[in-house]
Amino acid sequence: MAVNWTGIKQAFELMGVGMGGVFFVLFVIFLVAKLLLKVFPPEKEQ
Amino acid sequence: MATLLESITSITGGQIIMILIGLLLIYLGIKKEYEPTLLVPMGLGTILVNFPKTGVLTQVTGGTKAIGVLDVLFKAGIDTELFPLLIFIGIGAMIDFGPLLQKPFMLLFGAAAQFGIFFTVLVAVFFGFNIQEAASIGIIGAADGPTSIFVSNQLAPNLLGAITVAAYSYMALVPIIQPAAIKLVTTKKERRIRMTYRAENVSKTTKILFPIIITVLAGLIAPTALPLVGFLMFGNLLRECGVLDRLSQTAQNELVNIVSILLGLTIAVKLQANLFLNVQTLLIICFGLVAFIMDSVGGVLFAKLLNLFRKQKINPMIGAAGISAFPMSSRVIQKMATDEDPQNFVLMYAVGANVSGQIASVIAGGLLLAFFS
């Protein structure tokens, strides 16, 4: 079986972009969640 | 008489095997209760499409083309991506982001547990699939049926049937797959780590603004993920806004139920013997398992990495809950924790990670599509 090295290279690239991208987006959402909790605390609403 | 016998005599061995597979799916759905909402319609659909000259598929008889009902549904609901997106509205309406917003740190575990997707892409390419097909196989690791259908229909529609069967089957097998995978990479001592939980309230304004801001963010950062994220968040907004309870209930019940029936039956178009019975399908079923195992391993190893720098240790099993299979994965983690130590309650952390996995999986799906756009 001949290994498709171009494909393997692309798969590594996809892994870097994909995992990096997911962590980046989720980290931004984490910051947004933190900000929302700070700006709109439950006590303020009550 | 000859006409009556024609159907029986023209049936192929492959079609008989597919009819048996259809019966197996129905059995698993009813008897084992493995994702019955999808497996039962899919099972019956598989039987329907595997009879020779079946009227449910488009046929040319006597020079006249008769359009099959399942082909009509497929064009309307799957080619257009409509069915998976409608299901996302219902899923969004079912999700409570409360536990995640109480501990936003759990978001990172959702990201880590997507590792299985990208690892499987690598494995699939190694075994001869092209990169688009490999990405579609990898998305089984999203542990999210509609995302798998959405992505594979765009990147490798020829593999849609096998990917859908693998995605839903392994989602149902989470209680078997995850404990084995977690035990492979954790010690008993690690599984016994206790985590104290202090319940914190989240304001209504936060819960309403959260889905809106996530939609805007997805539009700016990952626009290809916007159909998935947008429909998911729309469902959640219906739930949280407080003035659309009837719509929220409809999305959670009637909408999801109707679309699940149609989706399950329609996906069977790709479960015809000539499309399904090949070595590729067997490989996809194997790689789907790899994806689920590596999701769990990725999440656990990320938690263990964080523990190197933290004073207050995280139970690494929480990392494995970062997949999209909700609430099954968080239940599995809690059960494993109490099996090791009856006084160990990690459920709320696991739920937070699990909800995060639902967001992370659609983001991962969008990023896969963006890579090829």
Image: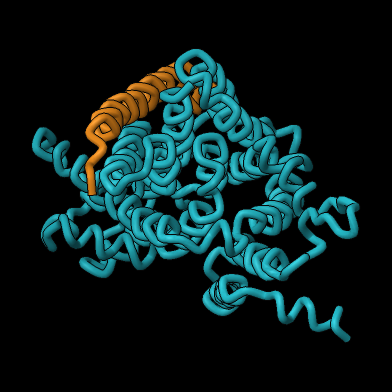
**Between residues B254 and A14, which one lies in front from this camera angle?**
A14
- Residue at 22 percent across and 41 percent down: it is A3
- Quarter of the rendering containing residue B50: bottom right
- Residue at 57 percent across and 40 percent down: it is B153
In this rendering, is residue B348 above or below B169? above
B187 left or right of A1 in image: left
**Between residues B170 and B311, which one lies in front from this camera angle?**
B170
Indicate the chain coloured orange by its letter.
A
**Between residues B344 and B177, which one lies in front from this camera angle?**
B177
Indicate the chain coloured cyan by its letter.
B
Q: Can residue B352 be seen in this view?
A: no
Q: Quadrant of the N terminus of chain B?
A: bottom right
- Residue at 40 percent across and 55 percent down: it is B284
At which x and y percent is residue B77?
72, 42
Q: Is residue B36 visible?
A: yes
At which x and y percent is residue B299?
27, 44
At which x and y percent is residue B371?
41, 24
- Quarter of the rendering containing residue B3: bottom right
